[in-house]
Amino acid sequence: MDKRKRVSLTINQKLQVINQLESGVSVSRICEQFGIRKQTVSDIKKNKDKLNKFSLMCDVDTKTKPRKRMKLARETSLEEALFKWYVQQRSCGAAVRAVELKSAAIKLANLMNIISFKASEGWLWRFRKRHGIINKRNYEGEDESDVLNAPKDEIEPFRQKLIQQINNEMLLQSQIYNADETGLLWRALPENTQAFRYETLTTGKKIGKERISALLCANADGSHKLTPVIVGKSRKPRAIKDIMNSLPVSYYNSRKAGFTANTIFKNWFFNEFIPAVRKFQEKKLEIPPDDVKCLLLLHNSLAHPSENVLRSEDDKFICMFFPKNTTSMIQPMDQGIILATKRIYRRKFLDEVMVLEDEENTRVQRTLENLKNYNLKSTIFNFAAAWKEVKVETIKNGWANLFDDRDTDIDLEGLEAPDFCTAVLNNIGEEVAEEDMLHWLEIDEGDPGYRIMTENETANEEKIVDNELESEDSEKDETSPKVKLSTIRSHLDDIITFIDDSSDKEMQPFYAHFRNFRELIIKKQQTSKGHTKLDYF
């Protein structure tokens, strides 16, 4: 039985195989030279005409990123024209957002008579990834669209190094992980909505600018999604201080609500990541404890300690860093996984704050009221639920470019800008321009999840006292007054009656839960009244 490892030849190597076959070299000698099977040689021979035609259309001898598949952009001429336009705009210092890219692509497609082209967000995302275009956000939060000067010649050597590491350690895909941080503006509204304009006119704190940082981590086959990590400013925020031990996320804090290398990330790696992965491999994969091992892939970041630090004592849990400035192209979490999580979160956010009201003239006020009541607790539970809803296929696809050197497919069904525009229209009766909605969906794209600090801030990071970290606790509570127990009980009565009268089978399982909750409220009512003293009589 032939036990050769599967080898994936480049287009150029396949052309060499064809040339040697035509020169009379034996199939056995070719198999030995390239480390391939006879069937592979036969398949290459069958595709001779396609390979020769593709080599005339594309540069297959490039050393920076050798081609392995005969795949072109669907509209190559449009792709080239749009990228030329983009480079010209950037060379003039013009900011090019997603909206401008889509608009230019549509105009160019019309001028080039490309009728079938559709500037979907999936197409836009793939175009950006192919050319290393990201939205960078500076410290003040201003957007700057730029081409990432990625050292592409380092990607293929890293890929080969990774494959060699996997083979040497005999790692399963379920034992290879990637983690990445991102910033999140958790209470921002789409611009040019009535509620947004009203909120920006009010004095005081702009609640739409509040941000946290989040970390997501999963393995290559999508079988293990770790508990998400959230970093806020306050050590014990008012909204969650009573449930800190029962949150669906791991909560940390830092002065600028960003990840730090020597405290947060290091603690997460040793106290959460390693135990969680060990438990998963022993319980779910049924791997013997002595055979448990793991490789965590990370990007070079100020929020990450060095590879030597991020290593278990038994060397079974190790890290490998991507080459600098290549993560937007090959880091799995950046290939649509974080994007999908944020889109699902924002859908949940809109569902919660933009509630349809009977009276049209009260919709904006009610939306703003819901927005002010929307706190860190709501954010944490919605973000955790969003991460839970991310599909296994989305995670698997995120690793495609790293492992197989192929374009990543991303499923944004129901999560594109027009879908959100429709949701706003249906909920509060407002029309929002697609470009405004797209800008909102990308408002924190490029936020790395850590903040660049001055020398003084860096030196004092470890010396911040608790009262500074708890500044959020001392702020005036912006939420509305507490609802009376009698009001809650009245609403529960209505809900129970509604479920009882409903024939919807999906609602029936909640009947017992609401009855139990009402019973708890009744007990609270009785306790709050206290016992009447005998002296009263």
Image (cartoon, rainbow, N blue to C red):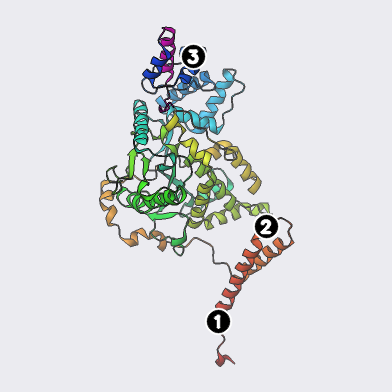
Q: Position of residue 2 (x, y in %)?
A: 43, 26
Q: Is residue 114 magenta?
A: no
Say which element carries label 2. Answer: loop
Of 427 and 122, nearer the camera is 122
Of 155 and 334, nearer the camera is 155
Residue at image position (62%, 64%) is 513
Picture quarter containing residue 107? top right
Q: Which residue is mark 2?
A: 507
Q: Which residues are magenta?
A: 1-24
Of 368 and 393, nearer the camera is 393
User: Looking at the picture, which amino acid does disc 3 mark?
Assistant: Lys
Q: Are marks 1 and 2 in contact (CB under 8 Å)?
A: no
Q: CA distance from mark 1 to mark 3?
A: 89 Å
Q: Is 375 rendered above or below residue 398?
A: below
Q: Position of residue 5 (x, y in %)?
A: 40, 28
Residue 530's disc is 1
Q: Is 129 rendered above or below residue 229?
A: above
Residue at image position (33%, 49%) is 260
User: Looking at the picture, which amino acid does disc 1 mark?
Assistant: Gly
Furthest residue toward top: 23
Say which element carries label 3. Answer: helix
